[in-house]
């Protein structure tokens, strides 16, 4: 890092988080760029738990210190090697990191790249393995592929596609041999005809379904009309009350008079 302030540190961490996502926690020393309010607020906003090692005791952050120590040792050895003469330091660092991330760690017995991405990184050693697999597959193909030569009158079995639900093999006899290109054209035309037949059958089925729906809708409309035509008064008619023209008899009472 060219600068050691908190703003530059946050920008570098954003680049890392953009590639690998947000971590659960960050462990660092007590540098001023880590103890700044800006960095602490950045960790809070992103849900990162931040830990610091005790002052003047770097052994508590042993994993980071060990990684730095092994990196320095590897770069020192690479610079002393005559093979790497003229190679830049950044290239040596990238080579070291590539091999380190693709090598099993003694605590986890897994490669750091595999733990991060779920797979090992491809190296030049994989080309040797790929060539072996390619040779094995080619030899297997040469063993399994049959170069059959047919003649007129030979008995063969052909797939029958007339019934789409049952694909049977039917016994047949070769009557005439044609060129391979003509045979391909014949197969393509046969497949087209078969697909057209299937589409026609589907159309017929759809038209039948539509006719059945229309017929059922007509029946339902007729039933509704019959129901509406029924007179409600006839269906729920009240009993008629017979009315008599005779007036009711009144009880006449004699008037009360004063006897003087």
Image (cartoon, rainbow, N blue to C red):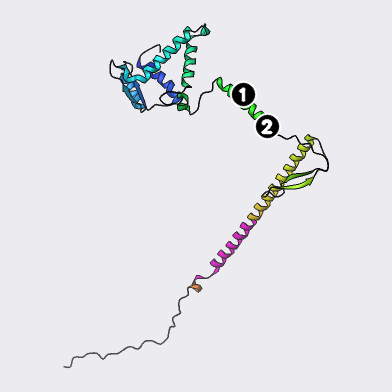
Q: Secondary structure at mark 1?
A: helix
Name which quarter of the figure residue 125 lies in. Answer: top right
Q: Residue at x 51, y 8 (%)?
A: 84
Q: Quadrant of the N terminus?
A: top left
Which residue sits furthest bottom? Answer: 259
Let me know if residue 230 is in the magenta part: yes
Residue nearer the viewer, 213 or 243:
213
Q: Quadrant of the C terminus?
A: bottom left
Q: Position of residue 227 (x, y in %)?
A: 54, 67
Q: Residue at x 35, y 14 (%)?
A: 5
Vertical relation: 79 (above or below) 219: above
Let me know if residue 189 is in the magenta part: no
Name the dominant secondary structure of the magenta segment: helix
Left or right: residue 22 versus residue 224 is: left
User: Mark 1 or mark 2: which comes first in sequence?
Assistant: 1
| Residue position for label 1 | 131
Q: Residue at x 41, y 18 (%)?
A: 12
Task: Give the crowd class for mark 2: few <14, some 14-19, many >=20 residues within 10 Å.
Answer: few
Left or right: residue 183 versus residue 34 is: right
Left or right: residue 182 versus residue 90 is: right
Part of the protein shown in magenta:
211-232
Residue nearer the viewer, 19 or 92:
92
Residue nearer the viewer, 145 or 246:
145
Q: Residue at x 41, y 21 (%)?
A: 14
Residue nearer the viewer, 204 or 23:
23
Which residue sits furthest left? Answer: 260
Vertical relation: 13 (above or below) 155: above
| Residue position for label 2 | 141
Q: Position of residue 234 (x, y in %)?
A: 51, 74
Task: Give the crowd class for mark 1: few <14, some 14-19, many >=20 residues within 10 Å.
Answer: few
Name which quarter of the figure residue 138 lies in. Answer: top right
Task: Report how far apart the C-alphas of labels 1 and 2 lie in the structure.
Answer: 15 Å
């Amino acid at each position: 890092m060219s600068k050691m302030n908190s703003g530059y540190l946050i920008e570098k961490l954003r680049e890392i988080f953009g590639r690998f996502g947000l971590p659960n926690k960050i462990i660092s020393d007590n540098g001023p760029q880590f103890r700044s309010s800006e960095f602490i607020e950045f960790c809070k906003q992103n849900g990162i738990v931040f830990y610091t090692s005790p002052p003047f005791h770097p052994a508590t952050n042993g994993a980071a210190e060990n990684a730095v120590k092994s990196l320095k040792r590897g770069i020192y050895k690479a610079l002393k090697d005559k093979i790497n003469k003229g190679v830049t330091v950044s290239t040596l660092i990238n080579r070291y990191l590539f091999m380190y991330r693709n090598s099993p760690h003694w605590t986890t017995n897994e490669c750091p790249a595999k733990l991060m991405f779920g797979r090992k990184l491809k190296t030049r050693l994989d080309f040797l393995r790929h060539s072996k697999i390619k040779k094995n597959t080619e030899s297997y193909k040469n063993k399994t592929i049959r170069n059959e030569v047919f003649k007129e009158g030979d008995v063969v079995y052909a797939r029958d596609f007339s019934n789409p639900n049952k694909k049977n093999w039917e016994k047949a006899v070769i009557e005439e041999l044609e060129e391979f290109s003509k045979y391909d054209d014949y197969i393509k035309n046969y497949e087209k005809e078969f697909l057209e037949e299937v589409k026609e059958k589907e159309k017929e089925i759809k038209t039948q379904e539509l006719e059945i729906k229309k017929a059922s809708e007509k029946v339902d409309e007729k039933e509704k009309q019959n129901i509406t035509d029924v007179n409600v008064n006839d269906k729920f008619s009240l009993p008629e009350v017979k009315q008599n023209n005779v007036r009711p008899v009144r009880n006449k009472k004699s008037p009360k008079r004063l006897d003087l």
